[in-house]
Image (cartoon, rainbow, N blue to C red):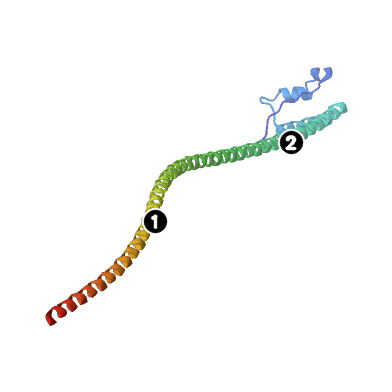
Amino acid sequence: MSEHRRRTLIITDDEETNPFSFREFLRSKEEEPDDEEEEEAVAQFLSQQEEGEEPSYRKHIQQLEEENSALKRSNQELHSRVQQLCEDLQQSKVKEQKEAADLETMFQSVEHNLLLTTKRAVKAESCVSKLKAEIQQLQEENNTLKSQCEVVMTMREKAQTASEYLNRTTSSAHSALKTLLAEADSLRLVSDILRSIDRLSSLHSDSA
């Protein structure tokens, strides 16, 4: 689709008074010409010049054609530049969107890690509280065991003392028993002697 552009033409005083000038030719057009219309107008004007216009106008037309070509090149360069800028802008938008998405992903990851860290900290704190309670319970049990050990040690000492006393008593009783047995033997001997004496006395009485 062709683009409409305005052209600034340098027109001499002679062209203003000449009904066959290029300005008068363009003024006769109802709409502003595009590139193709300009070329047709130039060609038509050149054909009119060939029919009897002065050669100076041909030089002016050639100059206008060169200016028109330069404007076309400049327009193409500007169009290419605008297109390149649009592409750069689009790439920049895509890059910004990607960076924004990466930042959002990073933020979500950091938030997730922070949530996990918070949960771990709460869990660790709960474990520490449980461990403290268990340590306190173990300390109480240890104190109870120490008290029980002290009681057992006291009972052991008392049992050992009682055992030693029983051993001493047994030894004393054994000695006393030996003494009693010896005395019993002595008494038995004395009894036998007395019985023998009594028997002899009885025999002597009977014989008298």
In this rendering, the label closer to the viewer, 2 or 1? 1
Percent of width and height locating residue 92: 66, 37
What number is the disc on residue 35? none
**Residue 142: in sight, yes or no?**
yes
Confirm or deny contact between disc 2 and disc 1 (CB under 8 A).
Answer: no
Looking at the picture, which amino acid does disc 2 mark?
Gln
Residue furthest to the right: 55
Q: Can see residue 47?
A: no
From the viewer's perspective, is residue 117 above or below residue 149?
above
Left or right? Give the position of 65 relative to 123.
Answer: right
The tag earlier along the polypeptide, 2 or 1, is 2
Camera-side residue of 165 and 65: 165
- The local crowd at label 1, few if under 14, some if 14 to 19, many if 20 or more residues have their Cα within 10 Å, is few
Please tell me whether residue 71 is drawn above or below residue 128 in the rendered image.
above
Residue carrying label 1: 160
Residue count near mark 2 (Cα–Cα under 10 Å), binned few <14, some 14–19, many ≥20? few
Residue positioned 19% across, 78% down in the render: 200
Percent coordinates x, y for residue 188 in the rendering: 25, 72
**In the foreground, 159 or 38:** 159
State the residue position of label 2.
76
Tell me the residue at 64%/37% (across/down).
90
Q: Quadrant of the C terminus?
A: bottom left
Locate residue 74 relative to residue 187 in the image: left or right. right
> Residue type at mark 1?
Gln
Q: Is mark 1 on a helix, strand or loop?
A: helix
